[in-house]
Image (cartoon, grey):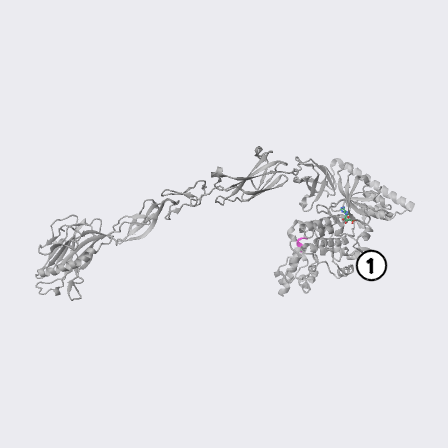
Amino acid sequence: MDCRLGVLFLAIFTCSCGAQLSSYPSNEVNLLDSKASQGELGWISYPSHGWEEISGVDEHYTPIHTFQVCNIMEYNQNNWLRTTWIPRNSAQKIYVELKFTLRDCNSIPLVLGTCKETFNLYYLESDEDQGAKFREHQFSKIDTIAADESFTQTDLGDRILKLNTEVREVGPITRKGFYLAFQDLGACVALVSVRVYFKKCPQMVRNLAVFPDTVPTDSQSLVEVQGSCVNNSKEEETPKMYCSTEGEWLVPIGQCLCDIGYEERTFSCQACRPGFYKSSSGNMKCSKCPPNSHTYQEGSVYCVCDRNYFRSEDDPASMACSRPPSAPRNVISIINETSVILDWSWPTDTGGRKDVTFNVVCKRCGRGQQQCEPCRGAVRFLPRPTGLSNTTVTVADLLAHTNYTFEIEALNGVSALAPTQRQYAAVTITTNQAAPSPVAVVRKNKTSQRSISLSWQEPERPNGIILDYEVKYYEKQEQETSYTILRAKGTNVTLTGLKPDTTYAVQIRARTAAGYGSSSKKFEFETSPESFSITSENSQLILIAICSAVVIIFLTVVGYILVSRFCGHRRSKHSDEKRMNYGNGHLRLPGVRTYVDPHTYEDPSQAVHEFAKELDASCIAIDKVVGAGEFGEVCCGRLKLPSKKEICVAIKTLKAGYSEEQRRDFLSEASIMGQFDHPNIIRLEGVVTRSKPVVIVTEFMENGSLDSFLRKHDAQFTVIQLVGMLRGIASGMKHLSDMGYVHRDLAARNILVNSNLVCKVSDFGLSRVLEDDPEAAYTTTGGKIPIRWTSPEAIAYRKFSSASDAWSYGIVMWEVMSYGERPYWEMSNQDVILSIEEGYRLPAPMGCPVALHQLMLHCWNKERSLRPKFTDVVSFLDKLIRNPSSLLMLVEDIQSFPESPGDVSDYPLFISISDWLDSIKMSQYKSYFLAAGYTTLDSVSRMTIEDVRQIGVTLIGHQRRIVSSIQTLRLQLLHVHDDAFHV
Ligand code: AMP
């Protein structure tokens, strides 16, 4: 027996070292540990000679408790060993870990009884300690425990006992506690240690939340546990985890964030160190203080700005502290009368910010800087005085001849926090003469069908001596597309040459040495209607007057016929009657004044005195010579008529030694000119015939003749300005043709231009046209004609008419659009005549809008009846002016149309479908268009490529050529719908 026990103890001590070194997992909570118990265990053996407690110490001299039994020499063994009562605490599921050795029956020689190699584990639940009372049948069996291995073979061949470890689960336990019991039925077993434990989820910090120790339930479900935030942190989303039955934490949800001034360090939130700050909650680290700021405390939420540095309310804590900018630099002032442009450079130091703006303070000063006071009243800042983001401002409406100081301050977002650090730059200026203020009221004094007399008061603030007034007027419905400008020395003016029953808009502005003031507002006045309406009161009187007039005329005519017959006297062809009703053989429209040919007067000087005012030579002062005419020099000078303002005039002189015929021809121009009253026809002021030199006085045209003027200003005008000039010329020509006057020598050299670019038709003569024009050449019919400007029928058989003037007008258009180029360049006159005969026409000048070249081509129609009338030309040009976009398409653009013929003269303005198809070499389709019902160009202009296909044009190239030409047609027709021209 002793020998056997020795073997057992050897085994215990061999194996106990390993057991002693092991530590338990953190999620296991011991309820009983036989090894850890210092004193007696108090376990009970039944019968008392069965299980035996052996107490000893391990190598660390820690007491150990071991139970053994080995009654293998006897039969019928039933030895029980019962633990003390073990309270279960909160646990439901219990684990029992047994460490034991078990002798292999084969290794024991001479076994007398029945040798077993297992023992049984039992348990009994109870709510309280039952003391020494033990009833075997009350216990429930947990399991039979067998050894895994009984022996281990050493290298030397020794067999040593091996320590077995077995773990069994018990539960769920529902009572407050329980007992364990070990039943031996005849084995040789030593129970080295018994540990009873349950599992839990141990306390832990996860996502800055503390989760407490949690004991799982016995069921399979997880236990949901809510964590609580560590100190100095707040829940962002409720932190949660689940505790599994195995004592493991699963599925963390939510988290806590460190408060401002705290950062996460080792599972906790710790205060920022000095020199660092954290201005928002979150698990980021504390940041270093930004430039120009500091903090000496722990847990700082922001850093304090250093001395003289600031942070605006809107600045984030992470932004460097900043300071006001330095003063603006290099202030420049540009004074223009009573306004000044101030300009400056950006400050050298912006204070570390980007939000720099500028404020400008205006001070009106006396002689010294001390006598400054803030500017009052209507001083205007453009765009504004404060909050300027650009380094410039215009200050207007200052007083004339006044000293001002402007303080320009640069500001940024912290300027308001540092009033003492603010800096500004100052500039002192003195304003100049101011322009006059606007004319406030314009009154109508008198109106007639063709004139309106106006008067007004001097501007409230003339700011100097008023030199003159500029009176601008235009037909209201024309909306300023074309206007006339007059200059008035005094405060009244009569607008003449107006249309009856028409509303005119008038604007007046005064001029001083300082320049023009602002224009007055628009005043509207109406001319009288052409015929008065007859009221009931005066109708009878008017009726009587008309009847009397008819009777008188009748008697006069009858008397005249009788006297003529009686006297046999026939007046020459220069009869007054003819003068009254005809002009150049044209039947005039009733109500329209008619041109009277001075040659119809037997005494031409009579005509001069009928149509021209005789001036007193003493009223005229000649200043200088400006040109040379056929009869003498042309000078500029001044005309001062009694009770009228002095005006600038052109003075044409008749050189000394003239013949009577020359005198008559010279003055015939005045006789003709004096009959016209139109803003686009040179106005005759009068003549001096009663003293020498004989002169003709006309309005002065500052820019001289149009051809040289355009050559001087090559490419300097906009298309609209050029069209405006052409419109003026056409309007003057319309007046002439309305009166039945044929000019015969319309050319740019015979158009004069004033300072406002108003073009006026001049050069009215009779035989002179053929004599004095250097462009005129002798034709085969014997006349002297300006070939390049003259229509074929006028060249061929001297058929001059308004239609031949229209041809010349087309040439003037070409001259204008080419800035004074010579028509047909260096071609000889003969070549010009032949080319025209063959159908050649001048191509469009560079940059010429299609619409204008089309109009030229229309003027150059061989058939004179198909040329446009001047009234049509005026309304066509008006339409172009009103729709400037119609001028955008240039001839160059058309020429680049795919497949279109290169020469734009292939695009005459108004032609038949047949001509049009000929011009684009598509004549073969004439019948197709007719058959499909396209009879007018207008209908063709609306065709699409689909329509072109449908009428039977199948070749793609031909379709494209026709469609691109239709685009041009459409453009032409766009301008001439309404009543401008008729196809
Ligand atoms: P004329 O004899 O009308 O052809 O005039 C000869 C030149 O005198 C013209 O080419 C102009 O340069 C100039 N001239 C004629 N009339 C005027 C005028 N009313 N205003 C300014 N210059 C004029």
Describe residue 312's horizontal placement relative to residue 50 as left or right: right
> Height in image: 536 above or below 13?
above
x and y percent of residue 51 in the render?
11, 56
Magenta segment, which residues? 972-976
Residue for point 15% across, 64% down: 159
The quarter of the picture where the C terminus appears is bottom right
Residue 275 shows in this picture? yes
Some atom of ligand 1 lies within 8 Å of the CB belonging to the residue at label 1? no
The residue furthest top is: 371
Residue for point 42% across, 45% down: 290
> Height in image: 729 above or below 466?
below
Q: Which sits in the foreground, 80 or 663?
A: 663
x and y percent of residue 224 in the render?
29, 50
Prevailing SS of the magenta stretch: helix
x and y percent of residue 622 in the render?
78, 42
Residues packed near mark 1 inside 10 Å, few (<14), some (14 to 19) or many (20 plus):
few
| Secondary element at tag 1 | loop
- Residue beneath disc 1: 780
Q: Which sits in the foreground, 105 or 885?
A: 105
Labels in figure, total = 1
